Image (cartoon, helix red, strand yellow):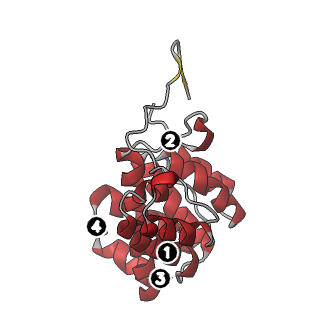
Amino acid sequence: MTGPRNGPRPWPPQRLAAPDPAGYSDRQQQIHDQIAQGPRGGVRGPLAVWLHRAELAAKAQDLGRYCRYDSSLDQRLSELAILVTGRVFGSEYEWQVHRGHALKAGLDPGIIEAIRLNRRPDFADPEAEVVHDVARAAHETRDVDDALYARAVAVLGEARMVDLVGLLGYYTLISLTINIFRVPPLGEGERELSDD
């Protein structure tokens, strides 16, 4: 987004870059290779920063692999929850990476745009609606009220509700890593998330 007179806001400098692969310990190299050879196909963004602490990277990427690829939530619902998380936290890297995944998974572009603009989308699908509402409530109030919880369990079931809460927790870790260490978007393109 551009300001009226000042042009695009520059990205703040990254506070902590990924460790230099030339200096990896054996364990860092092992974890790097496991991540790179898995479904992610590479080690970028917050996962690369976590390599400063190889065991954190190992455990977090295991949880992330479950949340992204093995959860009971279908990909469309997972990506919806991830986009809501990225939007609430203002994590541009997360938004940039997952917007394309969400489109590929079949999430309606109008829903994606409403989330980007920080507006509540119109939903025809009760599953998408409850995932959105749980994600927003979890991040904004750090809880869900009894009525929303009952609706979520009725629509998703208990198993998918557990997976949704786990996914929201994992992407909170991702978002905090991005924001605190100022992980820039790939290519450092223009900002997409703004509260202006």
State the residue position of label 4. 143
Q: In this view, does 154 lie above or below 178?
A: below
Q: Residues within 10 Å of mark 1 (few under 14, many from 20)?
A: many
- In primary-sequence order, the first of circles 4 and 2 is 4
Seen at 46% across and 76% down, the residue is 62
Q: Residues within 10 Å of mark 4 (few under 14, many from 20)?
A: some
Seen at 65% across and 52% down, the residue is 110
Nearest the eye: 85 or 145: 85
Check the picture and name the quadrant holding the N terminus.
top right
Q: Residues within 10 Å of mark 3 (few under 14, many from 20)?
A: some
User: Which numbered disc covers residue 184?
Assistant: 2
State the residue position of label 3. 160
**How far is mark 4 from mark 2, CA to CA?**
29 Å
State the residue position of label 1. 67
> Which one is closest to the eye, mark 3 or mark 2?
2
Nearest the eye: 72 or 14: 14
